[in-house]
Image: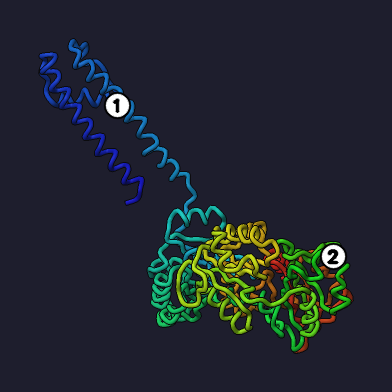
């Protein structure tokens, strides 16, 4: 029974009880105070007439004070009950009648779509990826209010139970391309089992919350079990390990000797305070600067007069040797390696992955967490200055925040920046919508779990497409040259029209990286482009 029906039932029961109570009082009062006995049915009629304002005074005038007071109280009660009915019953009924209601089934013609079981921040990124590739989807949301809100926001959603055969049939699972289960581990396994009952052949992808439970997703029949927190931890750790190891680390290989990488400019680097034009990056290293993140804002191409600071992250392409030379330029020229110079805050799955990466790279580190467990060096609160000092934040070179609550990360960033203005802060965000707040709080590099998760899901589902990057702040994809055949790069003007950069062309098994405005795109070419999600969407709309 829903809330409105329950309220209505209680109101009616209370109203009947009050009416009968007043009828008994009126019947007694007419005998005791007025000495004019009435039948109980007559007394009940008088009370109903008074409450409904359909009749007054059939027994008036009343001579006794007691009866006059009873009638006055009865009149007031009737008016109160009428006005009470408006907000309790009628207004919610009108709101429900006018509310946009999510459908309970999808249209019959829908096919080759992705069924997303419950909507999370990961699903938001996945939906953006699917829309970029023009792939249909439907969200199956069991909560009516949540489903209605998503429907009003423009999402393709139905209100149904993804753990039931009926719910997945309403989403037309047998004609779908894939199913994504993105709830708790228990619910995800239930969804996968139900999907197997509806259609054995459909591809199923399950997102695991606790790594040690991944095998149960496999046993339920999931075709792919994704644990994005591990990838997120490795990516965050790479922002430290690439600064002290002899390998480039966090890069994406495009050709045999051509990579794309994100390289953060560390505080203390000679590049801090210089503009792109003054840095001489192209002349000194040979790399191509595709774009740059300035305080969380991606710019492509960067303005030659844009000034680098300790939070700037460069997106560059080049050979391994060229990228190694640029990496040396991004590092601090006065950095020594001290005991405990890297502080990891948070010892969950992401934090443990970070610690493992730092250990493999022989990076000295201290771990702070609320829970006293193996691997935790300091037990304390990430938002308490005293606990942060005990972990060595005052003298640290880098702090990696691996907390699961974004509000804690934002506050901890403010405290850490106050304790050590020169420290580099690398932070995990749970939701992409909070990334900008973390940059404003003082973080130098932020990567959202929802972004990594959504791209992992898209890469798994879109087998016919090529989503190259999953843990970068920009998207790097491989696309066909449809619509651009026999056009030069200069004439296509891709960067100005879409904000994306063509970083390489794959032609007959070879990778062309020496590109210029005069380079002609052949119809059978594959283009490797880099850009934000919005930029990739514009590219697909313009040239897809």
Give the percent coordinates (x, y) of residue 256: 74, 89
Counting the numbered discs, the total is 2
**How packed is label 1: few (under 14 Cα within 10 Å), some, or many (20 or more)?**
many
Residue 171 visible in the displayed image: yes
Question: Which of the 4 image quarters holds residue 153?
Answer: bottom right
Q: Is residue 466 above or below residue 383?
A: below
The residue lying at 86 percent from left, 62 percent from top is 305
Looking at the image, residue 67 sits to the left or right of residue 10; the answer is left
Which disc, if any, is residue 266? Answer: none
Closest to the observer, 527 or 346: 346
Closest to the observer, 311 or 375: 375
Residue 177 visible in the displayed image: no
Give the percent coordinates (x, y) of residue 505: 78, 81
Which disc, if any, is residue 275? Answer: 2
The residue lying at 70 percent from left, 64 percent from top is 422
Which disc, if any, is residue 78? Answer: 1
Q: Earlier in the sequence, mark 1 or mark 2?
A: 1
Circle 1 — which element? helix
How far, Cα to Cα, is label 1 from label 2? 77 Å
What colouring style does the render use?
rainbow
Q: Nearer the viewer, mark 1 or mark 2?
A: 2
Closest to the observer, 383 or 323: 383
Circle 2 — which element? loop
Tell me the quadrant of the picture where the C terminus can be found. bottom right
């Amino acid at each position: 029974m829903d809330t409105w029906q329950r309220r209505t039932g209680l109101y009616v029961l209370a109203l009947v009880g009050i009416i009968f109570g007043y009828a008994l009082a009126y019947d007694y009062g007419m005998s005791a105070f007025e000495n004019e006995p009435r039948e109980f049915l007559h007394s009940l009629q008088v009370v109903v007439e008074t409450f409904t304002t359909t009749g007054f005074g059939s027994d008036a005038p009343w001579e006794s004070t007691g009866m006059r007071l009873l009638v006055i109280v009865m009149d007031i009660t009737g008016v109160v009950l009428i006005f009470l009915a408006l907000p309790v019953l009628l207004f919610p009924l009108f709101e429900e009648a006018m509310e946009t209601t999510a459908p309970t089934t999808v249209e019959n013609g829908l096919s080759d779509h992705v069924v997303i079981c419950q909507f999370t921040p990961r699903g938001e990124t996945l939906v953006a990826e699917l829309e970029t590739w023009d792939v249909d989807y439907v969200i199956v949301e069991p909560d009516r209010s949540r489903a209605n809100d998503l429907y009003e926001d423009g999402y393709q959603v139905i209100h149904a139970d993804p753990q039931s055969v009926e719910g997945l049939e309403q989403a037309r699972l047998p004609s779908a391309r894939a199913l994504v289960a993105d709830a708790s581990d228990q619910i995800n396994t239930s969804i996968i089992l139900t999907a197997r009952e509806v259609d054995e052949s459909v591809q199923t992808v399950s997102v695991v919350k606790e790594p040690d439970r991944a095998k149960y997703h496999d046993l339920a029949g999931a075709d792919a079990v994704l644990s994005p927190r591990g990838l997120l931890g490795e990516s965050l750790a790479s922002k430290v390990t690439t600064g002290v190891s002899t390998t480039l680390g966090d890069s994406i290989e495009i050709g045999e000797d051509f990579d794309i990488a994100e390289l953060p400019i560390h505080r203390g680097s000679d590049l801090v305070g210089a503009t792109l034009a003054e840095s001489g990056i192209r002349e000194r290293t040979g790399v191509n600067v595709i774009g740059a993140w300035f305080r969380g804002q991606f710019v492509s191409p960067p303005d030659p007069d844009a000034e680098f600071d300790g939070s700037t992250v460069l997106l560059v392409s080049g050979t391994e040797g060229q990228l190694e030379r640029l990496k040396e330029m991004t590092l601090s020229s006065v950095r020594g390696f001290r005991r405990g110079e890297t502080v990891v805050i948070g010892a969950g799955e992401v934090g443990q992955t970070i610690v493992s990466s730092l250990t493999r790279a022989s990076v000295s580190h201290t771990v702070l967490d609320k829970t006293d467990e193996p691997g935790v060096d300091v037990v304390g609160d990430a938002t308490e200055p005293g606990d942060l000092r005990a972990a060595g934040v005052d003298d640290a070179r880098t702090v990696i925040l691996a907390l699961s609550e974004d509000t804690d990360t934002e506050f901890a960033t403010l405290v850490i920046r106050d304790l050590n203005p020169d420290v580099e802060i690398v932070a995990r965000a749970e939701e992409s919508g909070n990334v900008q707040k973390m940059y404003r709080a003082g973080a130098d590099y932020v990567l959202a779990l929802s972004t990594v998760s959504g791209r992992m899901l898209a890469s798994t589902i879109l087998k016919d497409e090529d989503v190259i990057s999953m843990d970068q702040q920009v998207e790097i994809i491989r696309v066909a040259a449809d619509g651009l055949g026999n056009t030069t790069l200069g004439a296509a003007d891709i960067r100005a029209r879409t904000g994306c950069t063509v970083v390489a062309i794959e032609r007959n098994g070879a990778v062309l990286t020496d590109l210029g405005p005069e380079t002609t795109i052949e119809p059978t070419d594959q283009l490797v482009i880099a850009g934000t999600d919005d930029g990739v969407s514009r590219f697909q709309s313009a040239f897809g």
